[in-house]
Amino acid sequence: MRSFLEAKAAAEKSGTDKSQKFRPAGKKFFIILTAVVLLGASVYFWERTAPQRQQTPQHATITMRAAIPVTSSSQSSWPKLTLPPMGRSELVAVPPQMHIVVIGNNFRVHNVYKDGHECAFGEACVAGPLSGNYVTNEAGGTNIVSYAFAPD
């Protein structure tokens, strides 16, 4: 009977050695494998534990503008509100320490307060923190008004 070493040598010469399986490159392989696993785990846990970005709720009735139109600018550059016949505009948010100025014909400005009550211009209003304004059309047809903000 041949010894194990003789059989292995004969198999190596003939290329039929089935005792050798795929072996990675040792330490180098395990270092690379560890780095890849740690990188994948860190990305996974980073995304899970990162604070979620809070999105500002966008109400369909509030108009938010990046540049605040002020009364000192040309009236032709003021934003316009198109009012349907006997209808109303969307709610326009009012910047802090400012109030709305509206120009046009046949309209009425309404204040909406943070506690929910409303008051039209010309009525006795109870003061409070303002949430925004909307404009109602008192004309029989479509009406266009312009608005801007002035300091209180």
Image: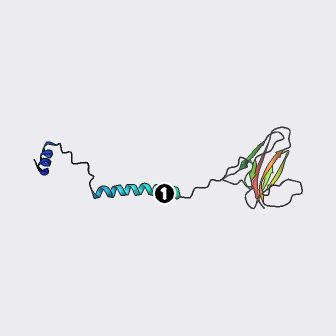
In this view, the residue in front, 132 or 32, is 32
Q: Residue furthest front?
A: 1
Report the residue at 41% width, 58% height from top.
Answer: 38
Q: How dense is the environment of label 1, judged by Cα within 10 Å: few (below 14), some, or many (20 and up)?
A: few
Report the residue at 37% width, 57% height from top.
Answer: 35
Q: Secondary structure at mark 1?
A: helix
Amino acid type, mark 1: Phe
Quarter where residue 137 is shown: top right
* Residue 82 spot, x, y in % from top left: 77, 42
Can residue 42 be seen here? The reply is yes
Report the residue at 78% width, 52% height from top.
Answer: 133
Quarter where residue 126 is shown: bottom right
In this view, the residue in front, 72 or 115, is 115
Quadrant where the C terminus is found in the figure? bottom right
Can residue 104 be seen here? The reply is no
* Residue 71 spot, x, y in % from top left: 75, 55
What residue is disc 1 on?
45
Q: How is the image coloured?
A: rainbow
* Residue 147 spot, x, y in % from top left: 76, 50
Q: Residue furthest top?
A: 141
In this view, the residue in front, 140 or 8, is 8
Where 106 falls versus 48 (above or below)?
A: above
Count of labels in the image: 1
Quarter where residue 140 is shown: top right
* Residue 100 spot, x, y in % from top left: 78, 54
- Residue 128 falls left or right of residue 95: right
- Residue 38 falls left or right of residue 9: right
